Amino acid sequence: MRSIKIFMISAFMILLMAGCGGDSIKEESSNEYNTEKHTEETKELDKIKEKINSMTLEQKIGQLFIVGFEGDIINDEIIDLVKNQEVGGLIYFSRNVLDSNQIITLNNEIKAIKKDIPLFISVDEEGGVVSRVPDEFLKLPSSGYIGKFDDENLSYNIGSIISKELKSLGFNMDFAPVLDIDSNPNNTVIGERAFGNNADIVSKLGIKTMEGLRDGGIIPVVKHFPGHGDTDIDSHYGLPIVTKTLEELNNLEFIPFKNAIENGADVVMVSSIILSSIDSEYPATMSKKVTTDILRNKLNFDGVIATDDMTMGAIMDNYNLTDAVIMAINAGNDLILVCHGYDDIIKSISAVKDAVSSNIISEERIDESVYRILKLKEKYRVNDDIISNEIDIEGINLEINSLLN
């Protein structure tokens, strides 16, 4: 009997040790996977650092700019901006759009220009009143209309459809969705562009649209931090001032942006509005107190920060453009949008070069932004691949009809 007990105890101990050994093997395997993944990520980051070290100052400064252009065919202005100025990206407006064949042809010709780093090829496509896709596509409703349904699946699918449209035309970045809260009935610039007048609706639906774009391979840019919803002046034409305290902003305007950041937002656009209780002198685009102290540090955003267009009235009518661009970089912005005026683009790029030479902007500050920009381009595999003219517009339109009916 004693022998049997000893045998049973020994068998139990062997099984127990085997079980522990099994867990150990699984744990070891998991650790190996995580280590390999971490090693791959580290290699990618090291490649980006090596790339930056090999770039000239002019190349690095060029990467900080997304610029607008004139015309709807390839021209000397576009070639100079891409080839010689080596800008980080281009943005399309209605003036650049005729139809799908024209957009595809132009994007392919832009991609064919010899350059060291592929471009962000971007557009404002929100649906509703802010839409740049050609009329061959059925128009998508405004975010305000979508918000009435409070349907996360609908919002995701809207983002997914936009990504299909833009991808088929050769774009890789969309300045959408809008995360402003439509809290001021006198607001003339946001209105139906917002998903609603409360933080919950805007957060839920805005994030789902962001995810639909992202899953479709389009870089979403959430906007317009710190919140353009409680303004009664359009920053295209004037300088809006918001008088709310930091606590009030935390309890409303910041909420959708906080939630988007927690859900992996890649890019946040900062608007040219003054938060008088935080920085009464400069708009958010030019304010380190807003861009770095709040967005970067308090909200823990480690992605790419983009300015709104620096050639809008809020800046041009109140500040010197090149001074504003320099301040925007020192405030913590990574991408500077200069959407109008070839001469203003060239002056802005030259001003940044001079500012680095004069130690007004440090080269380390430039490198920080270039690192984030190249990391984002690597994440989305931004490339110069030529795209086909044979796109399924009919199929996309059927999908839109099915979704909305």
Image: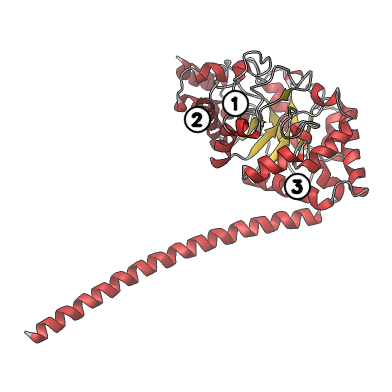
The residue beneath circle 1 is 165
The residue shown at (58%, 15%) is: 139
365 over 346 or under it: above or below: below
Q: CA distance from mark 3 to mark 1?
A: 29 Å
Q: Mark 1 and mark 2 in contact (Cβ < 8 Å)?
A: no
Q: Is residue 114 among the parts visible in the rendering?
A: no
The residue shown at (73%, 41%) is: 118
Q: Which of the pair 373/357 is nearer the observer? A: 357
Residue 149: x, y in percent? 46, 19
Residue 129: x, y in percent? 64, 15
Q: Amino acid at mark 2?
A: Lys
| Residue ranking furthest to the left | 1
Q: CA distance from mark 2 to mark 1?
A: 23 Å
Q: Amino acid at mark 1?
A: Glu
Q: Amino acid at mark 3?
A: Val
Badge nearest the viewer, 2 or 3: 2
Q: Which quadrant would residue 259 be assigned to in this image?
A: top right
Dot label at residue 204: 2
Q: CA distance from mark 2 to mark 3?
A: 31 Å
